[in-house]
Amino acid sequence: MNVELRHLRALAAIGDEGTVTGAAATLRVSQPALSRTLDQMERRLGTRLVERTTRHLALTEAGQRLWEHAHRILRQLDDALAEAASGGPGPLRVGFAWSVLGRHTVPLLSAWREAHPDTPVRVRRCDDPEGALRRGEVDVAFLRTGSAPYGPDPTARAELAALDLYTEPRVAAVPDSGPLAGRSTVRLDDLTGRPVVLCATAATTGAELWPGAGHGRAPRTFEVPGVDEWLTTIATGEAVGVTSEGTAESHPHPRIRYLPLVDAPPVTVRLVWPREPVHPATHTFRDFTARLPLSPAPSSDVDGPRDRDHHAVPPQPQPQPTRGRQRGRPTTHSARHSNH
């Protein structure tokens, strides 16, 4: 089975672009040449990787898996070459979706920089942090996952390991001119009569969050593609939203209030990394994060950032208990991504 790097690059580009035309332009080769490369790869593997018609192109199940592996292999090769040229590993790449660790983000990164000045961290926002991990685009990622049946089971992919950091309360995002803006807290039933906007990159909020969803008591929901659209939809009064409290810290908005949602289950904030890490500082970063005293904000301090002390935490903090639960216990599970 003689598969070459050019075959992997061809499949990676086709999967990324969604068309042979776009992939050929990205790779700067002709369409016929790219098609021949793909055909040759499929013959050598003995399986179809791409379903092609005159109007449609899609990766098969085998093609989707190999597309992810191809990205990771090519990324690891690029990293190895860069490390050889520079004489050391590059920055530790940390992926996140919406809000990293909320109010803990700056203290964590500042403390890491002080304790490990020779290993810089580069944060990267990803619509799909778990996918970015599998493709080798980031080295570790912070994810948020919901409790069943309100969120995905984070144990589906054995190639990823996860460390539970803390649980984070959910909040309602409401327009400041709406009838709920004057409340100090809200309940799920308070949102039932209003449209609820969902973000396409989120995995912890859906109609199933409402206990009466199976009996017609869930609100009407609709989806927007990203965080900017989600915020704008709420700010203009078209809908309300449900998110975790870290969003209030990372995405304050002058026309939106974030109110504690007192009867919704919390989300779990996790650090996730490949079980076979590429970056040598992966486990050091995991252990460093596990030692930090992370906890959710007080319920009275949800509606956007206040004048908090953002000085760096000591570089080698001692373990501290979290609210009524044990932290810092790694699991050899995978974690599906969750954004807010």
Image: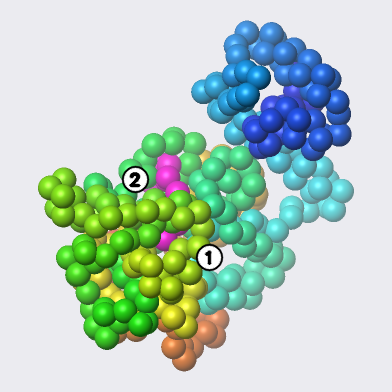
Measured as percent of width and height from the top left, residue 236 is found at 43, 73
Residue under the point 75% across and 35% down: 22
**For numbered disc 1, what is the local secondary structure?**
helix
Quarter of the image where the C terminus is located: bottom left
Residue 251 in magenta stretch: no
Range covered by the magenta-colored residues: 329-340
Residue under the point 74% across and 55% down: 90
Residue 178, placed above or below residue 87? below
Residue under the point 44% across and 35% down: 158
The 10 Å Cα crowd at callout 2, few under 14, some 14 to 19, many 20 or more, is: some
Determine which residue is flagged by label 2. 152
User: In the visual, does 217 lie left or right of 178?
Assistant: left
Q: Amino acid at mark 1?
A: Asp
Q: Earlier in the sequence, mark 1 or mark 2?
A: 2
Image quadrant where residue 154 sits: top left
Magenta stretch, main secondary structure, is: loop
The answer to whether residue 216 is visible is: yes
Q: Are marks 1 and 2 in contact (CB under 8 Å)?
A: no
Measured as percent of width and height from the top left, residue 146 is found at 32, 54
Quarter of the image where the N terminus is located: top right
Q: Amino acid at mark 2?
A: Pro
Measured as percent of width and height from the top left, residue 204 is found at 35, 54
**For numbered disc 2, what is the local secondary structure?**
loop
Measured as percent of width and height from the top left, residue 100 is found at 50, 65
The residue closer to the viewer here, 181 or 335, is 181
The residue closer to the viewer here, 15 or 277, is 15
Q: Compute the Cα span from label 1 to label 2.
A: 24 Å
Determine which residue is flagged by label 1. 228
Residue 194, placed above or below residue 85? below
